[in-house]
């Protein structure tokens, strides 16, 4: 019989602690600035290439510089319009009309789209009427708006309102109907009433689709308005482009076109920022 006291004891050897990982220093300020500059250059490479092509093609004779002057001449004309105050007047007139029509479309089309998408009887009632008007181009109704509302501001704002309402309305309806039924059943199983279900589940899930329609409407508000301003307007970017073309002021015409494109880009980026503000709960799977 072996005495317990005589058994060899095993000394506990403390585990060796792993060496601390060296602290990784964050990127320095010049490194961050270099990275931002590289991303900006990558995103603007196509625009820079287009600008270089626009500048060189008329100078080397690929196109007639009378009808397509170099970009530098267009920018000189744009600066002359800006310093004279003409460009600001035309931009102000166009933005007032387009933003007014877009705002009215948002205020009317989103609530109507939510109601149509949520209540099936209302959708069944209005679907035939919506199908008739959604396939009617806004510019085809321009003479009708002019005859009924005249050549003033009302007809142009009404035309923008009509053109912007359809992408917002249809995308809102699609957003409400496209909500995952499993989410709806889960919310109902937790005892949410119709109002809370709509507020907590339906509306947040439909926000991305609704803002897609708003962004499309933002582009339509500029495009349709420019076409409307070419008929019976005395101010606005559409009037500027048409007047410059009629008087063969080709650099001024291209300056107006560039301004229209820049405004459309700015409006789209603002709407993207607003969409991110209202969609902070979403997870970016591409990150």
Image (cartoon, rainbow, N blue to C red):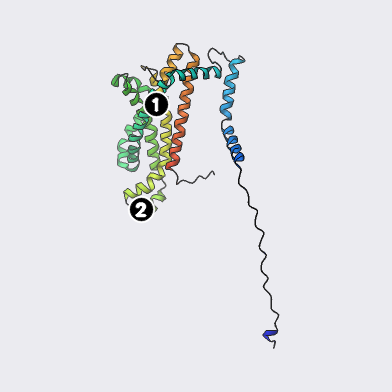
The C terminus is located in which quarter?
Answer: top right
Q: Is residue 50 visible in this depiction of the protein?
A: yes
What residue appears at the point 40 percent right and 33 percent down from the top-left corner?
A: 167
Label 1: few (<14), some (14–19) or many (≥20) C-alpha neighbours in 10 Å? some
Q: Position of residue 35 (x, y in %)?
A: 60, 38
Q: Residue furthest left?
A: 148
- Residue furthest out toward the top: 247
Residue depicted at x 32% and y 42%: 120
Q: Quadrant of residue 113?
A: top left
Residue annotated with mark 1: 95
143 above or below 247?
A: below
Q: Which residue is mark 2?
A: 188
Residue placed most toward the observer, 182 or 163 = 163
Left or right side of 241 for 104: left
Expressed as whole percent of the image width and height from the top left, the position of residue 8 reads 71, 80
Q: Position of residue 65 (x, y in %)?
A: 56, 13
The first of marks 2 and 1 along the sequence is 1
At label 2, counting other C-alpha atoms closer than 10 Å, the crowd grade (few under 14, some 14-19, many 20 or more) is some
Q: Quadrant of residue 98?
A: top left
Is residue 70 rendered to the left or right of residue 206? right
Residue 226 position, x and y percent, is: 41, 22
To which quarter of the image does residue 216 belong? Answer: top left
């Amino acid at each position: 019989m072996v005495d317990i006291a005589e058994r060899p004891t095993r000394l506990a050897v403390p585990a060796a602690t792993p060496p601390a990982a060296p602290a990784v220093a964050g990127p320095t300020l010049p490194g961050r600035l270099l990275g931002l500059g590289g991303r900006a250059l990558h995103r603007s490479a196509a625009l820079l290439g287009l600008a270089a092509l626009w500048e060189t093609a008329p100078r080397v004779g690929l196109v007639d510089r009378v009808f397509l002057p170099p970009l530098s001449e267009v920018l000189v004309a744009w600066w002359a319009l800006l310093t004279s105050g003409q460009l600001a007047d035309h931009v102000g007139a166009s933005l007032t009309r387009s933003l007014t029509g877009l705002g009215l479309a948002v205020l009317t089309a989103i609530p109507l789209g939510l109601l149509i998408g949520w209540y099936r009887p209302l959708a069944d009632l209005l679907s035939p009427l919506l199908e008739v008007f959604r396939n009617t181009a806004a510019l085809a109704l321009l003479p009708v708006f002019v005859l009924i509302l005249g050549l003033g501001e009302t007809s142009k704002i009404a035309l923008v309102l009509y053109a912007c309402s359809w992408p917002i309305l249809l995308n809102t309806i699609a957003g409400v109907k496209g909500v995952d039924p499993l989410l709806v059943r889960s919310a109902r199983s937790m005892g949410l009433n119709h109002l809370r279900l709509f507020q907590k589940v339906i509306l947040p899930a439909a926000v991305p689709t609704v803002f897609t329609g708003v962004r499309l409407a933002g582009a339509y508000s500029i495009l349709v308005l420019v076409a409307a301003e070419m008929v019976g307007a005395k101010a606005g970017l559409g009037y500027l482009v048409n007047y410059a073309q009629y008087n063969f002021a080709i650099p001024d015409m291209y300056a107006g076109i560039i301004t229209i494109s820049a405004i459309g880009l700015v409006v789209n980026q603002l709407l993207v920022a607003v969409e991110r503000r209202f969609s902070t709960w979403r997870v970016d799977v591409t990150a």
